[in-house]
Image: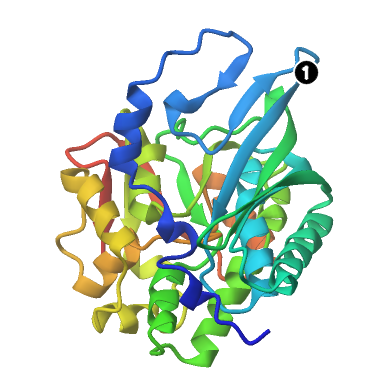
Amino acid sequence: MNISLLSECTNGGCGAKIGAGDLAGLISALPRVTDPRLVVGYDSADDAAVYDLQNGMSLISTADFFPPMVDDPYTFGKIAAANALSDVYAMGGRPVMALNLVCFPQALPKGILAEILRGGAEKLMEAGAVLAGGHSIYDKEIKYGLSVTGLVENAKLLRNNTPRLGDALILTKPLGTGLIMAAHRVGQASETDVAEALLSMETLNKYAAERLKGFNISACTDITGFGLACHGLEMAGDGASFVINTSALPILPGALEYAGDFLITAAGQRNRLHAGNAADADNLSFAMQELVFDPQTSGGLLIAVAAEEAGTLLESIKKDCPRAAVIGSVVKHEQHSIIFRW
């Protein structure tokens, strides 16, 4: 089974996502949904859909899949599942059930697919969710992910675009997975750097999300294919700006060095174009600019929490996520929605 998964696909991970600008244009043409029980739909660029069950609880529904970013099928399965589960955690919920989503070349050994599915199933068990089935088709390239169903108490639902002025911003995982895996694809990343990136991507956001209980959280999202800058733009919305202290950002080892060597991604450039003038990153080095636009696969949670509670929450999160950090604050809307400062 010595087959390179990377040789079977043209791109991988969340870097394969359609650009945020293109998606916005497509979604804007869809008919508006008028069902009052749909609490969160596709019109708000949130992390998952939410449907009110009218018993004090809501259903969370999301789907995520992509091509491999690593050669090992078992590792790929774990990362893809962790990434798909993340949207439920970002909404304040818990995953309860999932369906496999599989695209697989007919000519490849089925043992590869078995290992992908094993990795995904193990992550679901770790999350406390059940695998209930799925759908598979033959395709030219491997793709794997999950459709996930979760539950959330209505009073504890978290949105991505409701940050409160004065809140502190906490990021729970280090940045740089896209840059490191881009370098890995061309054989330029060290084994140690790749191992650090894989460990980060395999880690469930479950552990950080569980630490949010009892804290005054105003908004939350997970940082994935649109990178810190574009997910930050979605989260800031129209009424706030985020001031990000780049010297406080947790960064995976090697990421800035690979960016400086121009081992960058097409998705990162799409993110840069989409952000446009809304993100003020001109004062940053080229490598740091690439980092804040870098597409993350199974990235961390970005959390807006009352400033006076940020230190206590951070210490709690760091018990499971030692690289978590306070990276900035929410301020009144300024000329730029995202302001990066060194």
Q: Is residue 172 left or right of residue 122?
A: left
Please state the horizontal and vertical placement of residue 255, each as a whole percent of the image: 39, 78
Tell me the colour scheme of the image: rainbow
Please state the horizontal and vertical placement of residue 182, each as a whole percent of the image: 39, 75
**At 55% from the left edge and 58% from the top edge, which residue is drawn?**
300
**Quarter-of-image position of residue 204:** bottom right
- Crowd class of label 1 (few under 14; some 14 to 19; many from 20; radius 10 Å): few
Please state the horizontal and vertical placement of residue 65, each as a whole percent of the image: 57, 52
In front of the other: 191 or 315: 191
Residue 25 vs 293, above or below: the answer is above
Report the quarter where the C terminus lies. Answer: bottom left
Q: Is residue 140 left or right of residue 176?
A: right
For the image, the number of numbered tags is 1
**At 28% from the left edge and 67% from the top edge, which residue is drawn?**
290
In front of the other: 19 or 45: 19
What SS does tag 1 mark? Answer: loop
**Quarter-of-image position of residue 143:** bottom right
Please state the horizontal and vertical placement of residue 297, each as a whole percent of the image: 51, 61
**At 26% from the left edge and 34% from the top edge, which residue is drawn?**
333
**Quarter-of-image position of residue 184:** bottom left
Residue 142 visible here: yes
Q: Is residue 189 left or right of residue 299?
A: left
Residue 305 visible here: no
**At 35% from the left edge and 37% from the top edge, which residue is drawn?**
23
Residue type, numbered disc 1: Gly
The residue carrying mark 1 is 56
